[in-house]
């Protein structure tokens, strides 16, 4: 069938639709160039029957494959077939991706939607008074559709408007072309339906396969591209512009092009032929197929269709039949309508910040390009314009002329939001900067020279403030004039009224506010915004603030006015005047006068030179005053005013002129003005010309003798031009002013007075004798000269210093005079003569200085009386003068020291050893007179003696006595020395020497001790003497000798000074006879004693000593020494038995010999003789017995008897059981034994260890293990292996057995010395448990891709039982999913793994498994592990196998480094290291999460340097090679930079910060990539301070960590010492605590007399403590003004303090303070996750405070004072942190640094006001430091030690009483005392229990464990006392495990307390048996250090032990005594993390 016939049949079928018939058109597209089509009837056919019908109609072979699709290439199936409607078109293909061989047609219906009737009352489309001006809005409708179509483009969104008006190419046409997503045939059908909006497309009969409408997410400025809206604009625009619209489109992902034509001609034809008007045809063809194009359209469409090839998707709207008037408008008004389009889409083109062309702006990149192409008939050239290039649209003018913005948001009652921006356009100097409309006709501005009141035109005038944008595009016909809060106030306020006219604004809304279908007006926007329920809030840095919007706007407007308006500021108000000059009468009053103004950044003051402009003529002058019309008072701003000027030069112009201030020439300089004034001044008299007619001219500064005559003179007047003047130059018609001359010096006068003279010649006005004209002095002449003295005539003698000294030079000054008495110069050959009776005078020379003549260095010598001055007459003669002689009187004293005189005069002096030396000293001058001098110290130096000195400064003489001469070991000889005398301060005085001879003295110098007997034994000094132990040393005597070796006779005085050290009872009579007391020798051989005899007087001390060593006496008894006293049965006693003979004192006599061995015998019961050996040991001189062995009898004590001749010795040996040989099962469960799988055996197995004779063996080295017979059988017991107890017993309780069904055996195994022991076994049978879960089965889509940050596929987890069937009864909350980074060795999730919970079930979902859906994929691309768990009970978890997930990178978005490099600091030095910006850095293309992405991309990276301030590029640093940009190749998605440096001597500002900008250019990347920026600082020299700061910070962190670990492990030695000596430890601990308490630490010294009063907390400085010194200083300084504020709980208390202090004390009541109890997270944390990785350890400042009182009240106080203030380590880290926070559009609070800097919330830092002073300058107003942690630890130990000491004393007393009672058991009344003994035992047991409750009774290697639970912190101390058995002696105490050997389980509860206690108790009770009632488990919760503490609370039936924050006050302590086998504290289920549960194998107690 042909194509035309098929169309005819289809048209004929339309009439039959009413009868319910459904026909389908099928095109056969299997072959090339085939156009066959068939219309097939489908009524009553299903899909299979329809396929058979198609096969029959198109003769398809049964083995041939074919595909049926819709025109959208959707494959037909059963469901799609049912959706087919009558008239639908299908394509028949060989395969789905086959190319369309030819064009096909699809008939469609586009009946108008019912909205046509509903919305018919809206505005007429393009309602405008001028039709031509509406044409841009018609084009805008087509652009709206294009923007919506390109909304999802990842690259450039290209929109092109082609205006083809070249008739040579065909009919005129307008084409709108975009590269958007295109439309399918169904979507194109929907487009054709009139008023089918996006909201109704899903529910109508033409629903396509597109998704239903979803309102887009909010974006800034609502730039969501959601503006193709109503289904009206595109069709109305097409028929408004032309008569025919052709739609050509290709959808994304489809190979076919769809084409639709609607035209006025076609509609008219169908109406004429009575056809259905709204039926049409969509042509489906392949790209580039133009076979259907008519001839007349070829020129327009051929090129357009040819462009289709290669495009993935597009849409082209071709409009023809253009109205002629539209063509004319589009050509002639091209700039006008393109400017309007740029205005409409301003923010889509330029981004949400708009077209900000200022240098400091940061324009946001946008990818929308709208290009206009106009082609006209040649020779006109085509015009191409991108709307982004237009810079004169109104929004661009508004943005670039504004200086500040005010952002706000309006929220309406129906949840609509409007973003608003107000912009301020300042007044600049003399004009407003508010933009005028481009087409506004501005009236010419008249220039009024004489009248300017300062009032200028209003900036905005009556125009409205706000333009309104809807979904980012302008709604042109809706504007809003103003809101009430931004309107001009009726009354004058703080802001001038004209400032309200300098504001423009923009409103941005989304589609929640309705607009007309033509998008020209809003329906009710203004009504909704002005509704009283609308809330306006301000937006600051992206954050919404609920403030008073009117107040905020007014403050912002005031700030803009003060900061940006460049108006005239009138300063220095002087008063108000009334003007009478040339001003209108109505404006003569009032005029305010001022002394200065500020204009254009300059200051103009009264008296300042100015120049006029725009005046006739231009004049110069000085400012008199500034005038401003109006009634003003003080400084004021105004837009204009006037200035009164005094014309210059005043000598020529004596008048004033008033001009407007704007006519001051601001461009000229003061120098230029002065130059012009100087040109006028050149006409005035300038200088005087003076001449000397007689030739006797006196030069300037000439010198003449007195009496020289002056004159005569001739004077003329000249101007600057050299012209002679006799009168003043005339300026106007005034009178001529003559000049005259005045002389101030008398002519021809003889000048005799000496000095400087000045001659004055002045020019004066003849009429007034005034020497000035016009305020300027007339020229004058001045001559200076000097009159000097004549020749010398006589002289006078000057002052001579008195008194004078002999031999000391002095000067005689003489002054020579001329005849007038003036001082004059002396003659050159003058030689003076000096004469004086009784003295010898001389002088060295003469000096002349001006008129002074000096006789130099005169000396007088002679003998004078000491210390008395004598007067002499000195005669001075100067030969040659007329008066040549003068007399002068002088006084003379002794001279300077010259020599020493020492008495005795002899050079040799003899002295006895031990006596001092005596000398008399005199100091003489050079004439032999005794003289004095300051600091005249005479020294005497003698060897062996200290230096001696005497002061002769006052008298010149002195007696010198030395220390006694004491020579050692003189031994009768004499010695000779030299004595040296000198004066250190007078080096010129000769040294005097004396020879000294020392002879021996007669004093005692040596002692001899001897024993008087036959040999007279001499005891030498330090001798050792052997003597029998216990004996007496008698007949001791002594002798004394002097230094000469002579014996000294004993006298009572000498003997009284003799002392001995072995007795205090000494007889003086015996000493006088030379006898010493007897010496008792010690009884022990080892006791060596020291003995000394000494003599001491005031001069000497001598002694002698000896030592006595005792030796043994005769043997008295035999001693046996055993190295070991215990031996096992059948074993040889370890070690040996030594036998020795001892004397009476117990000393070993060593008298035994090797021959004595035969005389020794050994006897004992059961002793084995065959192994016994008695031998001799030479080394110890003793007999050794070895081989002691017992083979029979029962264990117990055996007595051994040793004999040697008459000596007998007994020894006891303890015999114990033999070597372990067997294990015996004493008790256990009955057999045969059957156990359920995973169940336990309740009855324990009791095993006994025995030796080979069956005796119970207590050898605890034997470890008994419980083993299964097969590996398949898993046995779990409380312990699987354990040593036997002290009785040789051990108990095993089997908790569970698991394994396959069958019979097994349990074996008990043990070994001793690696030899197995005989052991029993038990048989058991396993019965399977049908309800036992054994595994988890996981099902998910393993082929899905996992991009970082995406969503995981759904995981379905099934619980599988032992039988393989699913188990359904588990709670979904028990299932968890764990996610962590992949590690090879982990079998369970590590600590810190992310835990995710099961999702809620949905309808029709399988209930036999758990589903985990919508789980977010981690941000980092790497391998992760997922594992699922099911909590079976409180202790058991079931784990699935682990699944490895490979997370790949997401879409590339940026260029970033592998690791963030540190901030570079460079300098322009010649060292390359100092110039290096980056080194060894790799940049990669990354996704938004920092993962390396798009590794296959290639491109380049452009590196440049930018300024942070946004200034131009001038002065920026340059790279090496003197370039400002570098290009680096990017390969495989990365680029490596080995080194990047600046050049030597690079330009740049010192200390300035720059940005290193790395911009990637990757052509094949689908989206633009964000550049990487790295800030760096530029200096003139290198800086390393930041690096040192980082190293110091790391050091502090390591030191803190080491200190923490030391504190954890420092308890072992302390506790051990505590147990051994509690009293000593108690005292030492208390002393250490007191020492720490008294140590100096930081305290707050603010007086606080109010603290402790009713409802008074105290001053702020005392409410908190800060541990860190640096933090304490900066926090105290930050709130310095509040540190002394008194905090009260009530207002009444605050008022009371206020009244008492008369208002001088600041107070703050807490009942009037608002605070939010919730804690906000740090700014870099959002939704619990960090938005970036901060440095510098940021934390809230208030978190560093340790409260000393009421926690809640203090928290309220400091939350109000500090707010969210943050503390960071250093300033660089703080700036980086603030910058990163602000980039996330998050406000940043004030930041403090530990170094003392502050960055305010506004970003301001630097200066003294933002730098904390040293702590000394805070004067004690600083937070105190808390006591060290060590102090609180010691306080806890002191309390426990006190309890322990008290209990220990009671125990010891009771033990003494019990021991005394046992000693009396043999008494006859033993029966009567039996009951008393039992009572004592009970008391002892009670004391034992008390001791068990005292911490420290056990031996803990770690005395306490700290547990962190939320905000609560507690310390837990556990100890245990072993059970007490009444029939036996108490077992020794032992600790409850060792904490250091446990492995704490890290979990949500910190230290894993439950796990630790569980292990401790299990180690004590391995068989599960309960401890006896006497056992006491003590759980003590002690107060923690200052800060949050915790206590224990018990809930119902002891179900939970909950650790909650404690209330204020003492912390509770709980104890527990129970028969439970153990106490296990385990984490509770999710939802109650601070709770622990009891777990036990027996029922919990009921009380």
Image (tube, grey):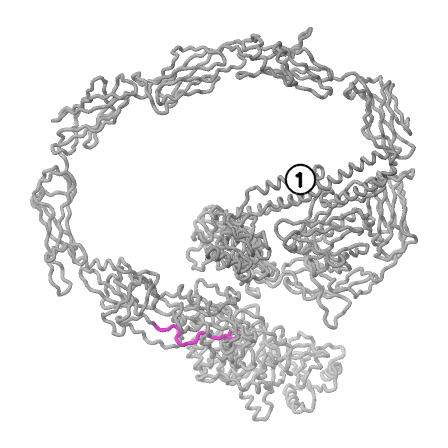
Q: Does the magenta stretch include residue 196?
A: no
Q: Where is residue 807 in the image (x, y as percent from the top left)?
A: 28, 20
Q: Give the labeled residue for mark 1.
A: 1626
Q: Residue 1119 or 372: which is nearer the viewer?
A: 1119
Quadrant the C terminus occupies:
bottom right
Report which quarter residue 1715 is drawn in: bottom right
Name the residue nearer the viewer: 1981 or 1926. 1926
Residue 555: image x %, image y %? 44, 66
Secondary element under disc 1, as helix, strand or loop, is helix
Q: Main secondary structure of the magenta part?
A: loop
Name the residue at 42% across, 55% down: 1515
In the picture, which quadrant includes the N terminus?
bottom right
Q: Which of the 4 image quarters holds residue 103?
A: bottom right
Please, is residue 678 above or below residue 988 in the view?
below
551 vs 903: above or below? below
Residue 1459 placed where, x, y %? Answer: 58, 54
Nearer to the camera, 1783 or 239: 1783
Answer yes or no: is residue 1253 visible. Answer: yes
- In the rendered structure, the answer to whether residue 261 lies left or right of residue 1878 reads left
> What span is colored magenta in the figure?
456-473
Q: For residue 467: magenta?
A: yes
């Amino acid at each position: 069938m042909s194509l035309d016939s098929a169309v005819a049949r289809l048209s004929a079928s339309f009439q039959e639709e009413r009868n319910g018939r459904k026909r389908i058109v099928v095109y056969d597209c299997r072959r090339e160039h085939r156009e066959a089509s068939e219309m097939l009837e489908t009524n009553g056919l299903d899909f299979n029957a329809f396929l058979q019908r198609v096969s029959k109609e198109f003769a398809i072979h049964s083995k041939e494959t074919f595909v049926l699709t819709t025109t959208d290439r959707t494959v037909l199936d059963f469901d799609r077939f049912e959706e087919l409607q009558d008239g639908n078109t299908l394509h028949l293909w060989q395969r789905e991706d086959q190319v369309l061989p030819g064009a096909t047609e699809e008939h469609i219906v586009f009946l108008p939607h019912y909205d046509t009737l509903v919305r018919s009352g809206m505005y007429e489309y393009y309602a405008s008074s001028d039709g031509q001006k509406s044409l841009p809005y018609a084009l805008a409708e087509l652009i709206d559709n294009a923007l919506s179509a390109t909304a999802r483009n990842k690259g450039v969104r290209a929109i092109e408007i082609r205006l083809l008006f070249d008739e040579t190419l065909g009919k005129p046409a307008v084409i709108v072309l975009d590269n958007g997503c295109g439309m399918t045939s169904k979507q194109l059908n929907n487009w054709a339906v009139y008023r089918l909006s996006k909201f109704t497309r899903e529910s109508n009969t033409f629903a396509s396969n597109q998704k239903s409408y979803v309102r887009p997410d909010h974006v800034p400025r609502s730039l969501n591209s959601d503006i193709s809206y109503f289904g009206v604009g595109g069709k109305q625009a097409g028929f408004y512009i032309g008569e025919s619209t052709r739609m050509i489109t290709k959808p994304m992902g489809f190979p076919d092009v769809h084409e639709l034509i609607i035209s006025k001609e076609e509609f008219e034809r169908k109406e004429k032929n009575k056809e259905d008007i709204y039926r049409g045809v969509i042509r489906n063809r392949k790209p580039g197929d133009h076979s259907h194009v008519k001839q007349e359209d070829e020129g327009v469409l051929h090129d357009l269709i040819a462009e289709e090839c290669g495009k993935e998707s597009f849409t082209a709207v071709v409009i023809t039949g253009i109205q002629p008037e539209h063509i004319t408008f589009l050509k002639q008004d091209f700039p006008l309508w393109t400017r309007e389009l740029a205005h409409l889409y301003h923010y889509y083109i330029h981004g949400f910040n708009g077209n900000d062309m200022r240098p400091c702006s940061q324009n946001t990149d946008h990818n929308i390009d709208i290009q206009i192409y106009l082609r006209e008939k040649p020779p006109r050239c085509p015009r191409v314009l991108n709307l982004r290039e237009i810079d004169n649209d109104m929004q661009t003018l508004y943005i670039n002329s504004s200086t500040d913005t005010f952002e706000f948001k309006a929220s309406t009652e129906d949840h609509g939001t409007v973003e608003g921006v107000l912009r301020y356009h300042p007044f600049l100097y003399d004009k407003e900067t508010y933009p005028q409309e481009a087409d506004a006709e501005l009236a010419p501005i008249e220039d009024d020279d004489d009248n300017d009141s300062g009032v200028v035109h209003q900036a905005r005038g009556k125009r409205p403030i706000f333009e309104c944008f809807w979904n980012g595009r302008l709604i042109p016909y809706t504007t809003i004039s103003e809101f009430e809060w931004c309107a001009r106030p009726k009354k004058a306020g703080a802001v001038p009224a004209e400032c309200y006219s300098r504001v423009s604004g923009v409103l941005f809304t989304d589609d929640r506010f309705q607009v007309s279908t033509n998008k020209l007006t809003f329906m009710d926007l203004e009504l909704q915004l002005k509704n009283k329920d609308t809330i306006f809030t301000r937006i600051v840095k992206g954050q919404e603030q609920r403030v008073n919007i009117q107040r905020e706007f007014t403050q912002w407007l005031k700030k803009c006015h003060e900061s940006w308006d460049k108006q005239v500021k009138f300063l220095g108000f002087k008063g108000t005047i009334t003007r009478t000059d040339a001003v209108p009468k109505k404006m003569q009053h009032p005029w305010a006068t001022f002394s200065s103004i500020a204009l254009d950044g300059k200051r103009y003051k009264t008296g300042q030179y100015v120049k006029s402009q725009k005046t006739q003529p231009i004049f110069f002058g000085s400012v008199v005053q500034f005038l401003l019309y109006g009634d003003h008072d003080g400084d004021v701003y105004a837009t204009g005013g006037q200035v009164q000027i005094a014309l210059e030069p005043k000598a020529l112009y004596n008048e004033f002129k008033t001009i407007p201030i704007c006519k001051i020439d601001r461009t000229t300089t003061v120098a230029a003005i002065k130059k012009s004034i100087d040109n006028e001044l050149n006409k005035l008299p300038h200088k005087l010309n003076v001449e000397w007619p007689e030739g006797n001219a006196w030069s300037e500064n000439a010198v003449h003798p007195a009496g020289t005559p002056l004159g005569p003179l001739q004077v003329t007047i000249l101007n600057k031009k050299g012209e002679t003047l006799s009168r003043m130059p005339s300026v106007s018609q005034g009178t001529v002013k003559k000049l005259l001359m005045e002389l101030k010096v008398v002519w021809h006068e003889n000048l005799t007075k000496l000095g400087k003279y000045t001659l004055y010649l002045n020019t004066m006005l003849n009429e007034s004798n005034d020497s000035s004209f016009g305020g300027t002095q007339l020229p004058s002449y001045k001559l200076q000269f000097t009159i000097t003295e004549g020749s010398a005539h006589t002289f006078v003698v000057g002052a001579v210093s008195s008194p004078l000294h002999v031999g000391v030079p002095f000067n005689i000054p003489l002054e020579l005079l001329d005849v007038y008495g003036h001082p004059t110069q002396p003659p050159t050959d003058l030689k003076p003569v000096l004469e004086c009776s009784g003295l010898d005078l001389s002088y060295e020379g003469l000096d002349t200085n001006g008129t002074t003549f000096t006789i130099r260095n005169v000396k007088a010598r002679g003998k004078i009386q000491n210390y008395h001055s004598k007067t002499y007459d000195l005669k001075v003669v100067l030969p040659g003068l007329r008066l040549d002689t003068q007399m002068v009187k002088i006084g003379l004293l002794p001279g300077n020291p010259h020599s020493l005189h020492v008495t005795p005069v002899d050079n040799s002096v003899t002295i006895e050893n031990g006596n001092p030396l005596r000398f008399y000293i005199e100091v003489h001058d050079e004439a032999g007179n005794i003289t004095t001098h300051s600091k005249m110290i005479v020294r005497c130096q003698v060897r062996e003696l200290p230096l001696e000195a005497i002061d002769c400064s006052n008298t010149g003489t002195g007696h010198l006595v030395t220390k006694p001469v004491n020579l050692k070991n003189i031994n009768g000889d004499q010695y000779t020395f030299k004595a040296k005398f000198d004066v250190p301060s007078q080096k010129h005085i000769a040294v005097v020497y004396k020879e000294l001879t020392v002879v021996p003295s007669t004093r005692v110098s040596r002692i001899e001790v001897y024993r008087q007997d036959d040999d007279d034994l001499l005891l030498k000094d330090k001798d050792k003497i052997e003597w029998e132990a216990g004996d007496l040393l008698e007949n001791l005597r002594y002798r004394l000798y002097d230094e000469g070796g002579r014996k000294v006779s004993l006298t009572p005085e000498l003997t009284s000074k003799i002392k001995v050290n072995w007795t205090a009872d000494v007889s003086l009579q015996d000493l006088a006879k030379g006898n010493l007391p007897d010496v008792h020798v010690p009884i022990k051989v080892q006791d060596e004693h020291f003995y000394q005899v000494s003599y001491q007087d005031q001069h000497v001390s001598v002694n002698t000593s000896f030592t006595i060593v005792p030796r043994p006496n005769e043997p008295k008894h035999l001693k046996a020494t055993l190295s070991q006293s215990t031996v096992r049965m059948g074993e040889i006693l370890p070690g040996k038995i030594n036998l020795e003979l001892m004397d009476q004192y117990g000393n070993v006599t060593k008298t035994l010999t090797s021959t004595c061995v035969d005389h020794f015998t050994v006897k004992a019961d059961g002793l084995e003789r065959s192994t016994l050996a008695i031998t001799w040991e030479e080394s110890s001189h003793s007999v050794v017995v070895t081989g002691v062995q017992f083979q029979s009898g029962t264990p117990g004590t055996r007595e051994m008897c040793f004999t040697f001749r008459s000596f007998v010795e007994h020894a006891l040996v303890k015999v114990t059981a033999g070597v372990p040989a067997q294990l015996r099962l004493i008790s256990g469960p009955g057999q045969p034994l059957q156990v359920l799988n995973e169940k336990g055996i309740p009855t324990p197995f009791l095993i006994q260890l025995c030796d080979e004779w069956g005796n119970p063996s207590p050898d605890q080295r034997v470890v008994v293990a419980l083993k299964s017979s097969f590996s398949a059988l898993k046995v779990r017991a409380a312990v699987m292996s354990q040593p036997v107890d002290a009785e040789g017993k051990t108990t095993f309780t089997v908790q569970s057995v698991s394994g396959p069904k069958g019979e097994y055996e349990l074996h008990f195994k043990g070994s001793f010395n690696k030899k197995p022991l005989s052991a029993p076994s038990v048989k058991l049978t396993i019965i399977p448990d049908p309800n036992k879960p054994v595994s988890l089965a996981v099902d998910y889509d393993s082929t899905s891709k996992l991009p970082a940050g995406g969503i995981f596929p759904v995981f379905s987890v099934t619980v599988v039982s032992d039988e393989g069937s699913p188990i359904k009864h588990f709670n979904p909350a028990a299932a968890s999913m764990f996610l962590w980074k992949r590690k090879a060795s982990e079998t369970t999730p590590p600590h810190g793994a992310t835990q995710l919970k099961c999702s809620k079930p949905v309808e029709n979902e399988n209930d036999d498994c758990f589903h985990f859906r919508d789980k977010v994929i981690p941000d980092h691309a790497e391998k992760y592990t997922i594992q699922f768990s099911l909590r079976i009970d409180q202790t058991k978890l079931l784990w699935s196998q682990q699944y490895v997930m490979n997370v790949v990178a997401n879409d590339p978005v940026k260029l970033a480094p592998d690791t963030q490099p540190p901030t570079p600091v460079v300098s322009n030095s010649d060292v390359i290291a100092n110039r290096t910006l980056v080194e060894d850095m790799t940049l990669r293309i990354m996704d938004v999460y920092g993962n390396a992405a798009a590794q296959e991309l290639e491109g380049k990276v452009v590196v440049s340097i930018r300024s942070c301030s946004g200034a131009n590029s001038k002065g920026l640093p340059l790279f090496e090679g003197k370039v400002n940009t570098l290009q680096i190749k990017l390969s495989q998605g990365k680029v490596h930079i080995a080194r990047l440096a600046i050049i030597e001597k690079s330009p740049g500002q010192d200390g300035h910060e720059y940005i290193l900008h790395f911009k990637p250019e990757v052509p094949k990347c689908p989206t633009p990539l964000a550049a990487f920026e790295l800030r760096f600082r530029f200096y003139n020299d290198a800086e390393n301070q930041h690096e040192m700061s980082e190293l110091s910070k790391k050091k502090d962190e390591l030191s803190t960590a080491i200190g923490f670990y030391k504190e954890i492990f420092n308890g072992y030695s302390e506790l051990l010492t505590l147990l051994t000596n509690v009293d000593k430890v108690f005292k030492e601990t208390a002393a250490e605590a007191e020492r720490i308490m008294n140590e100096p630490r930081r305290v707050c010294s603010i007086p606080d007399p109010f603290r402790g009063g009713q409802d008074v907390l105290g001053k702020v400085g005392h409410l908190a403590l800060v541990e860190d010194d640096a933090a304490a200083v900066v926090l105290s300084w930050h709130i310095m003004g509040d540190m002394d504020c008194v905090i009260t709980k009530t207002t009444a208390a605050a008022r009371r303090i206020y009244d008492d202090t008369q208002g001088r004390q600041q107070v703050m009541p807490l009942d009037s303070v608002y605070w939010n109890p919730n804690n906000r997270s740090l700014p870099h944390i959002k939704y619990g996750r960090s938005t970036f990785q901060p440095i510098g350890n940021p934390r809230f400042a208030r978190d560093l405070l340790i409260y000393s009182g009421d926690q809640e009240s203090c928290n309220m106080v400091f939350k109000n004072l500090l707010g969210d203030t943050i503390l960071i380590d250093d300033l660089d880290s703080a700036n980086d942190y603030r910058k990163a926070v602000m980039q996330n559009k998050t406000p940043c609070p004030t930041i403090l640094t530990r170094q003392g800097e502050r960055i305010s919330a506004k970003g301001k830092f630097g200066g003294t006001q933002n730098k904390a002073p040293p702590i000394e300058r805070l004067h004690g107003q600083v937070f105190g430091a808390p006591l060290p942690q060590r102090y609180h630890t010691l306080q806890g130990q002191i309390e426990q030690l006190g309890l322990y000491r008290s209990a220990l004393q009671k125990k010891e007393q009771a033990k003494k009483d019990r021991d005394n009672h046992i000693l009396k058991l043999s008494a006859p009344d033993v029966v009567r005392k039996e009951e008393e003994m039992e009572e004592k035992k009970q008391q002892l047991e009670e004391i034992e229990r008390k001791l068990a409750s005292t911490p420290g009774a056990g031996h803990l290697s770690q005395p306490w464990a700290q547990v962190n639970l939320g905000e609560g912190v507690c310390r837990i101390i556990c100890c245990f006392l072993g059970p007490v058995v009444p029939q036996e002696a108490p077992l020794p105490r032992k600790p409850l495990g060792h904490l250091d050997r446990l492995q704490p389980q890290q979990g949500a509860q910190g230290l894993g307390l439950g796990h630790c206690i569980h292990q401790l108790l299990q180690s004590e009770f391995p068989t599960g048996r309960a401890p006896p009632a006497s056992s006491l488990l003590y759980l003590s919760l002690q107060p923690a250090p200052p800060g949050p503490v915790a206590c224990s609370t018990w809930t119902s039936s002891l179900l939970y032990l909950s650790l909650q924050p404690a209330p204020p006050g003492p912390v509770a302590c709980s104890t527990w005594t129970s028969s439970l086998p153990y106490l296990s504290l385990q984490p509770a289920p999710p939802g109650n993390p601070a709770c622990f549960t009891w777990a036990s194998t027996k029922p919990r107690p009921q009380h």
